[in-house]
Image: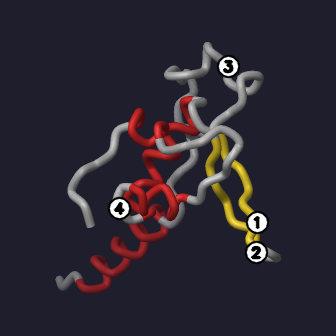
Amino acid sequence: MSAHRPNHDEILATFQPGKVYEATAVAAKFKQRATELKPTLEELVANGRLKRGIRRHGSRISPGYTLPTGAEADPRAIGTTIAGPQYARNWKSTLTGYDREMRTRAELCMAARTR
């Protein structure tokens, strides 16, 4: 595949308003794999420059990407994000299985210990 990584503007230039594109179709235009290009497409969705859509092939439905229309494009959301990753709400909880693993190791050490 191609070593050229397309930037956001190059990707957006390939989209036509009102048309839904699958990740594989967009990736094929740049001679890339869809798995390599999908994180960039998701960044554009998060920034509000693209939106998710549905593409139908007969009875098959596949996810796709489309340009937002003028009413859907929020000028404040384009290029900015205030949301961060969601963290666990209970900060005092322990990791799953960590305490059990430590107890098992301690028991094994005590059993193998000689006097």
Residue drawn at 67 percent across, 60 percent down: 63
Residue on which the image places disc 1: 56
Q: Which mark is residue 32?
A: 4
* Between marks 1 and 3 in the image, the one whose residue lies nearer the viewer: 1
Q: Dot 1 lies on which element? A: strand
**x then y, percent, for residue 10:** 39, 39
For the N terminus, the quadrant is bottom left
Label 3 with label 4: CB-CB less than 8 Å: no
110 vs 102, left or right, is left
Residue name at image x 28 percent, y 77 percent = 109
Q: Specify which label sits upstream in the sequence, 3 or 2.
A: 2
Indicate the secondary structure of the residue bearing disc 3.
Answer: loop
Real-space Cα distance between discs 4 and 2? 24 Å
Tag 2–tag 1 contact (CB < 8 Å): yes
Say which of 94 and 112 sits in front: 94
Q: List the single residue furthest toward the left.
A: 115
Asked whether residue 23 is in view, the answer is: yes
Query: What residue lies at 71% left-to-right and 42% top-to-bottom?
Result: 18
Q: In the rendering, at what x and y percent does residue 115 appear? A: 17, 83
Q: Amino acid at mark 3?
A: Asp
The answer to whether mark 4 and mark 2 are in CB contact below 8 A is no
* Horizontal arrangement in the rendering, residue 45 relative to residue 60 (left or right): left
Residue 89, can we see it? no
Q: Which residue is mark 2?
A: 60
Question: Which quadrant of the view contains residue 88?
Answer: top right
Q: Residues within 10 Å of mark 1 (few under 14, many from 20)?
A: few
- Crowd class of label 4 (few under 14; some 14 to 19; many from 20; radius 10 Å): some
Query: What residue would you read off at disc 3?
Result: 74
Marks 3/2: CA–CA distance = 31 Å
